Image: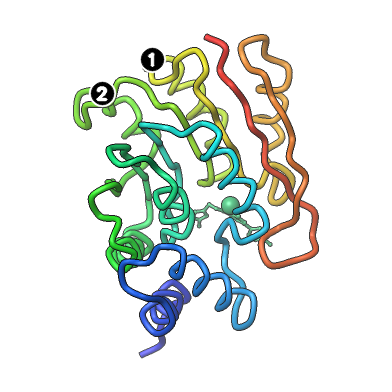
Amino acid sequence: TQSTRPQRILGAVQKNATRGDPRSVVRAIDQYCRNQEWAMNVGDEKGCILDSVVSEVNPATVLELGTYCGYSTVRIASLLPPHAKLITLEFNPEFAVIARQVIAWAGLEDKIQLVEGASGDLIPKMKEQFGVETFDLVFLDHWKDRYLPDTKLMEECGLLRKGSVLLADNVICPGTPEYLEFVRSSPRYESQYFKSHLEYTKVEDGMEKSVFLG
Ligand SMILES: Cn1cnc(CNC(=O)c2cc(-c3ccc(F)cc3)cc(O)c2O)c1
Ligand SMILES: [Mg+2]
């Protein structure tokens, strides 16, 4: 039977990456998606912007919206301090099955909790079910029309504190116009645009970093 793209990405990791070496997992996915078939990982170019923001924030608690195959999950977790935790939400069970195996290959199961379900349903349960107070860093990379409603929901649920950083992928391609307008015009956020390119292409894309001012 035909394999799926996520299954082929997992195969590339198991073939080319070293177990327990997260950066080799990141490299194996980038090489596969650049040379064999495109996939919607944040990729190596925008990944460097992600790395610099993670290193600058040095977060104890991270929320990722949109796991896909776990590329950015592994990339972020590989930079976290010892007791830091990353919660990643994925709606698509097929993606979740692959991401769990990619995370395991990287040896990062202890830092990462992958939760299956819709972000709009799970965000209100974060405190009670996952023992989270607030998030130091949120990486938005899920359905582009959910960036704004989920940001408002995180505010309402008290999951953001003064200084919490939101980093949003794809604000140009596919684009998140309502989200961008909101964070750039709201007095409660300080936003900065990082110009880049759509993963593995020359098409313009970018990431928006927004600090919640409380
Ligand atoms: C189905 N699904 C489950 N999760 C998601 C959320 N992610 C995206 O939609 C997404 C899409 C693209 C993209 C796709 C086609 C194209 F021509 C250009 C860009 C790039 C990304 O980096 C993304 O994160 C979608
Ligand atoms: Mg993306």
Quarter of the image that includes the N terminus: bottom left
First of labels 2, 1 by sequence position:
2
The foreground one among 1 and 54 is: 54
Where residue 176 appears, as percent x and y from the top left, is 67, 39
Q: CA distance from mark 2 to mark 1?
A: 9 Å
Label 2 neighbour load within 10 Å: few <14, some 14-19, many 20+: some
Label 1 neighbour load within 10 Å: few <14, some 14-19, many 20+: few
Kindly identify the residue that appears in the image at 46 percent across and 17 percent down. Answer: 155
- Ligand 1 is in which quadrant of the figure? bottom right
Q: Residue furthest bottom?
A: 1
Horizontal placement of 79 versus 173: left or right? Answer: left
Name the disc covering residue 127, or none. Answer: 2
Q: In this picture, is 180 found above or below 142?
A: above
Kindly identify the residue that appears in the image at 33 percent across and 59 percent down. Answer: 96
Residue 213 figure quarter: top right
Q: In this picture, is 21 found above or below 16?
A: above
* Circle 2: element type: helix
Give the residue pinned by disc 1: 158
Q: Is mark 2 within 8 Å of ligand 1?
A: no
Q: Is mark 1 within 8 Å of ligand 1?
A: no
- Hey, what amino acid is under mark 2? Lys
Asked whether the beta carbons under mark 2 and mark 1 sit within 8 Å of each other, the answer is: yes
